[in-house]
Image (tube, rainbow, N blue to C red):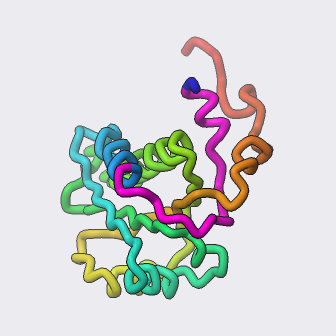
Amino acid sequence: MNTLELIQKRCSIRQYAPTAVEEEKIDYLLEAARLAPSAVNFQPWYFLVVKEDEGRRKLQECYPREWFKQAPLLILACGDHSQSWKRQSDGKDHMDIDVAIATEHICLAAAEQGLGSCWVCNFDTALCRKHFNLPETVEPVVILAIGYPENPDLFAKTPKKRKATDEVSKRETF
């Protein structure tokens, strides 16, 4: 499948089969994240792979939704402000952008491997920081729920509600 087909296939999955994700697939996802670009190549990210019951319960306290409990694999994507590039002109910290790029690399790699994923950003970051003893400079940015979709046909049937290309781009010479 080409890149555009992969992007079209990827969608948020919130119903997972009770099947563990194989270690080689987890390694593949982490390699995809490792290869992501970042501002000035600082790579200010790290990923906590959570698949054991105790860690899963901790993340479920941070995001208490029923569907979230089904995912056999959770990845907590974190960014370290002390390792990120800051733009000189306005001080913009690019950590969140860098982590987002690496996170989407994981999602695309998951879709390619037949796994579903869902970004979770609306979680209790303070509780998450406490549960996982994150240093002050490290921010939990997103939790990824990952697993085999309960209904694999969702990949093909989920319509993408997106703006038209001409609404999000401008082709002019400046």
Residue 23 magenta-drawn?
yes
Residue 145 or residue 42, whichever sits in front: 145
- In the picture, measured across the screen, residue 101 lies left or right of residue 159, that is left
In this rendering, position of residue 89 left or right of residue 101: left
Residue pictured at 77% horizontal, 32% vertical: 164
Find residue 57 and report its horizontal and vertical position in percent. Answer: 46, 86
Asked if residue 132 lies in the magenta stretch, the reply is no
* Residue 100, percent from left and from top: 44, 51
Please tell me in which quadrant of the rendered image residue 23 appears: bottom left
In the displayed structure image, the side of residue 97 where residue 161 appears, left or right: right
Residue 171 rendering spot, x and y as whole percentages: 64, 17
Q: Is residue 84 above or below residue 168?
A: below
Q: Residue at x 77, y 47 (%)?
A: 158
State which region is magenta.
3-24
Quarter of the figure with the C terminus: top right
Q: Is residue 121 above or below residue 26?
A: below
Viewer-side residue, 74 vs 139: 74
What residue appears at the point 72 percent right and 28 percent down from the top-left corner?
A: 165
Asked whether, in this view, residue 68 is left or right of residue 106, the answer is right
Q: Nearer the viewer, residue 44 or 7?
A: 7
